[in-house]
Structure formats: C-alpha cells, structure tokens
Image (tube, helix red, strand yellow):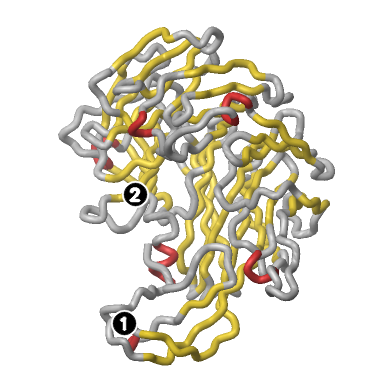
Amino acid sequence: MKQPRSVERGAALEAEPATAADIGEWSLRSTRRDLLRGSLGAAILLAGPRVLRDAFSPSVAMAAPATGSMPYFVFGTPDPSNADDPSFLAGEGASTTLLAHRLAAPPLRSIDRSRLALVSIDEVAGSAGVTVTVVDTGSASVTATGTLTLSDAPDALVLVTPALSLDAATVCLAISITTPTDWRDLPKLNPLTGNTETRRVATWVSSHEIAYFDTRSKSFAGPFPLNDAPALASVNVVATATDFYLWTMAEPAAVRGTKANRTPAPIPDLSAYPFGSGSRRFTQPAPATWPVNGEPVAALTNGNLVRLVSGSILETYSATDGTSNSQSLRDFAALTTPRPARTRMDQRPDGSLFISNPGLGRAVLLDGRNPSTVRASVAHDRRASLAGSRLPQTQLSEDGKAFYALGPSGGIVSYSASSGQRTAAVADDMQFTGLYRLSSGGLAATSFASPKLTFFDDSLTQVGVADTNFYIDGVY
C-alpha cells in the first residue's frame, strides 16, 4: 500500500500533498483514493460452495463441507494480475452477486456463527463512506446494509475498527480520522538530485468518532465525535449486548514534553458508551499496554470484559465501572520461541475462550464466566517454519473434546483435549498454512499450493477441496 512519505499510524506527523508537478520518479506520495483502496491490502471475501463454479478455478473438483448445503466464506487478497477490485461474492449456479468490496477490517463473526459483519471504506460524494454489510452464514444472503458518509473528512486518512454486539443486532464502529493541520513550507533535500527544494508539509493529527449500525432498522446512529485529538489512531474495541467499549490513548508524540520539561508518558483509557450514544457512561485509566497490536478482546458470559496483552497476560475488566485485574497465563509466559509468535484468543459459542500460540506449541481453553478456570490445556508439536505466522494453526472440535493442530512436518494432528495425548494424524504430505473452524461446522485447511482449500469433518475425514487465485487470510 502506498502512503504519503512520512505518514505512520497513530502519530502527529508531517507529509506532503501530491500535485501534478510532484508526480515524478522519486515521489512516494499517493492519492486519497489509493489510500482508501489499500486500507487492508485490497481484501476480498467469497462465499461457497454455491459460487464455487464461478469464484474458483473450474479445473478443480469442488465439494461442500460436512454440512453439505451451507456455504463457507473465504477472505483474502486478490492476485493483482487477475483482480484489482476486491469484492464479496455470493450466488448460485452461473449467477454471482457483488455484496461488498474494499474491506477495511477482517470480517466479524457473531458468537453463534450465524452472522458475518463486513465493514468497507470508499469515496462517497468526495468524502469517505463507511459501508456495513451483514450476511447470513447459512444462506450467504445479505440481511442488512447501510452507508455512513463522513462529511467532515474529505482529505482525511480513515481507519475503522468494528465490534459486533453479542446478539449481532448492532455493529459498532470506532472511526479514526487523521487530518492535516499547520500547513507550511520546509526545505527538503531531493535524494536523487542533491538539490534542496521547498515542499509544502503538514502535521497530521488523529481523533475519533463512534457510530452504530442497527441491523434491524438498517440505520445508523452517529457519528459522534469524541473530541480526543491528538490521539493515537489505533484502538481496541469490544461490544456487549448494550454497550460499546473503547481503549484509546493520547498521542505520545504530541504530549511527550521537552528535554527540559519532560511529561509523564500517557496511558490508555477505557470508556463505555451505551448503544446509540456519544456520551460516556464512564472512563477509567487502563493498564499501560498501548492498544496498537490488535489485542484480542472479548465479552464474558458474566458481563465482564477480557483483553489479552503481551501474548501471555489476560486483563479482566468490570463492565460496570472499568476497574481491572490481570493474570499471567503460565502456559505461555514461561516459554520462549526463536522468532516472534502471536497468541490468539477466540471465543466459542458457549462463551469459553480458546487461547493458542502455535509457535510455543501451547493451547488452553478457559471458562467463559471465570477465565481463571482452565478447562483444558494441550502441549502440541510445533511446525518451525510457521512459528511466526499470524494465521491460526490450532482449533477445537465442536464438542470441545478434540484438539487439532498443523503437524510438525505436514498435515493435521489431533489430540485429546482432556489428556493431551495425540490421537490421529492425516494428510502428512500436505503443507497447510492455516486451520479454520467453519461457521457451518467442520474444518478448513489452507495451503499456498493447489488446492488452496481442503475441508475436513471433526473426525478428520477429508470431505472436499477448492481452489482460488487469491491469497487467503481467513475462512469462515
């Protein structure tokens, strides 16, 4: 993705506007349209199996997952040699329909797996438009859609971080708007010619707005400005059945003080907003971890919130007043890996928390009401070549009794969740890169080589394959 020369997320920054005279061999600037289109690497989401004959290569045999008639969904980045306009497709037979495109965030799946919420950004009447699309995972049909125009952001850089309510009736949006201020002329050295040139530059400052999309009335409330500039653009978010929670933080570069007069480093705040409102119910200082790495957050079945930080610390927050405590996950904290390995946290339909780190070879299942209670813990073999991958490589069976992981040299290995003992291994000759739980049940394994999708039921019986011409980031 091309960006203005000095722009990074979450800082008070300087960058130059693009003009016709600036478009030269050395220019690294971009139009706003390029920025919006590249917000998530040109993301695409396809629905199958009803669209497989059209959305995937026809030379590969296609089969439905274990449930037969229910579709599955593939999220990824198109091969630029074949497609440059990311899309969401669904249909039947020879007919397909464009449902959403230019996704600004990975799809959100409801806790019962019956809905997917998609958020995309495009230009509407010269400004940014945020479109929300909700899809039924059983039929691949759109149940609600709407577009929110940000009328005050014609020249802004826009990031959207969404959250889905527990009943999937409300899609909450945290919208980061970074705008240029303090335009001025500064001398710049052209690295190609060695000449000093005058360039027009600005300081980019971020603030946030929030909005709510009601999937029943198909209408928006907001946007409501939080008036928190200068703020760090990145946030953490989660929604319960009634409230939207945001972890935000002041921009450190703007409040750091000077060498002679240093000021304390800012810490995050946790704020709660009732659905449909821009007025805070409370704001509470949060633990010091910055909300910059897409920290996993979930709403517990007892009404409280959890946030996983630093890969091994689980913070628990009161949904009433935001007070918090933390616990160290011993299965992850005491281990090291030669390359960075991301710890994932996924919430299951019963509310329990499945936490895994394939680089460490560890996975745990925590109780959904009391996350200090460990239901199951498994130590599994690691695949060294995928130790630093951000894709999921472990899953649980629907009944929680079997644990699956990509094998150390290939294929998929299953373990007993109660004893941790290895029980089976399949497809040892396949170099899978990711392992996913389908909305309709069963598993999907991805690969760089053809076929890129292989489907299994919970007994690890292969039930189908499919292929595609884009890079897969998720299967639902």
Q: State the residue position of label 2.
A: 77
C-alpha gap between disc 1 and disc 2? 27 Å
Q: Amino acid at mark 2?
A: Thr
Quadrant housing the N terminus: bottom left
Quick check: 164 left or right of 316?
Answer: left
Label located before the other in sequence (1 or 2): 1
Nearer the observer, 350 or 262: 262
Q: Against 391, is 256 above or below? A: below
Quick check: 244 left or right of 402?
Answer: right
Please give the name of the residue rendered at 33% of the width and 33% of the height, measured from the top-left corner: 385
Q: x, y (%) of residue 192?
A: 28, 82
Q: x, y (%) of residue 282?
A: 82, 52
Please give the name of the residue rendered at 66% of the width and 44% of the height, measured from the top-left corner: 238
Q: State the residue position of label 1.
A: 23
Look at the image and tell me whether residue 272 can be seen. Answer: no
Q: x, y (%) of residue 300?
A: 70, 31
Secondary structure of the residue carrying numbered label 2: strand
The image shows a total of numbered marks equal to 2
Secondary structure of the residue carrying numbered label 1: loop
Q: Residue furthest front?
A: 260
